[in-house]
Image (cartoon, rainbow, N blue to C red):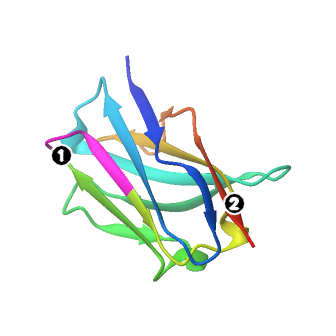
Amino acid sequence: QVQLVESGGGLVQTGGSLRLSCVVSGVTFSTTTVGWFRQAPGKERLYVGHITWIGSRTYYTDSVKGRFTISRDNAKNTVYLQMNSLKPEDTGVYYCAASPRGSSSYENWGQGTQVTVSS
């Protein structure tokens, strides 16, 4: 059974930083791409970025480029989302999702962690 557990959310002021963690189990982590998504109140879930299992390449949506960094630690089955220079529009529930090798979609999702950026 694949499980993803996010942590690290909280309340932070504009310009502050947070680091989210996503621990993945039940899948071969070293060959799993992991993505981050966020959902603001009353809005659809949107893509934030992802890290591939081949070469740990990272990709980001334009609004977070230069501020957010995704990394992975295969020894800990964990992916991190370092968020700097946070803005109120970054507020939302952040989810991680797993796309195992051979899959073309994100098959498994975590329960989410709340990030609130106050102005």
User: Magenta stretch containing residue 92, yes or no?
Assistant: no
Q: Is residue 67 above or below residue 73?
A: below
Residue 96 percent across, percent down from the top left: 48, 45
Q: Which residue type does callout 2 highlight?
A: Thr
For marks 1 and 2 on the same chain, the one whose residue lies earlier in the sequence:
1
- Would you say 11 lies left or right of 71 here? right
Q: Are marks 1 and 2 in contact (CB under 8 Å)?
A: no
Residue type at mark 1 is Asn
Q: Residue furthest right?
A: 42
Pick the residue in front: 89 or 57: 89
Tag count:
2
The quadrant where residue 88 appears: bottom right
Which mark is on residue 91? 2
12 relative to 35 in the view: left or right? right
Kindly identify which residue carries mark 1. 74
Which residue is at the front of the view, 13 or 7? Answer: 13
Give how far across and how far down residue 51 sits, in percent: 34, 59
Q: Which residue: 59% across, 59% down?
A: 47
Magenta segment? 75-80
